Image (spheres, rainbow, N blue to C red):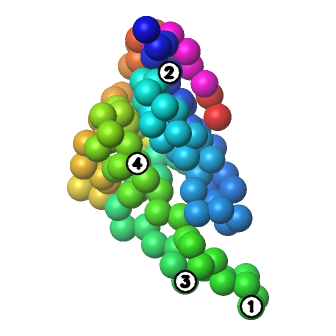
Amino acid sequence: MAKKVLNVIATAYRATLEEQDDTIVWLSHAIRDAGAPVDILLRGNAVCYAVKAQDASGLAFGEKKQTQPPRLADDLAKLVAKGAEVYATRDDLADHGIEKSDVIDGLRLIPRADVPKLLGAYDLVWHW
């Protein structure tokens, strides 16, 4: 049986200027598509990934336009649709002024105090 993996993402917007994806969200899709049970915990600034209304479609640096902007909330929603659990710390959402109504459907909110218990439920925990 495959080991249960939890990808903890705390550093937000890594490589999203160069690519259209966050590398760890992309990796989580690839691992899940290969048949391994992988879930995600968003904490710190990465809780912003779950906000539905973010839009980087107008992003440009001088004459260089980002033609394939990241759609992180959509990427997370697709993971949920594949059966992955996507968690976020309720405290970090509050610290960033994000309301529950602002985030994707299926996001599982947990208090920061419950993070150790969540980590204990997985065979492997990768922190990014």
- Residue at (39, 57) in percent of width and height: 74
User: Residue 76, labelled with which disc?
Assistant: 4
Tell me the residue that label 2 is attached to: 5
Q: Amino acid at mark 3?
A: Gly
Percent x, y for residue 96? 46, 52
Q: Main secondary structure of the magenta part?
A: strand
- Whether residue 39 is situated above or below residue 19 in the rendered picture: above
Q: Nearer the viewer, mark 3 or mark 2?
A: 2
- Residue at (73, 84) in percent of width and height: 64
Point out the tag, 1 or 3, that comes first from the N-terminus: 3
User: Residue 87, labelled with which disc?
Assistant: none
User: Residue 58, labelled with which disc?
Assistant: 3
Element type where label 3 sits in the image: loop
- Quadrant (top left, top right, bottom left, bottom right) of the N terminus: top left
Asked if the magenta segment contains residue 123, the reply would be yes
Q: Report whether residue 122 is seen.
A: yes
Point out the tag, 4 or 3, that comes first from the N-terminus: 3
Mark 1 to mark 4: distance in Å?
Answer: 30 Å
Left/right placement of residue 47 relative to residue 99 reads right
- Whether residue 28 is situated above or below residue 70 in the rendered picture: above
- Residue at (65, 62) in percent of width and height: 19
Percent x, y for residue 26? 55, 46
Mark 4 to mark 3: distance in Å?
Answer: 21 Å
Tell me the residue that label 1 is attached to: 63
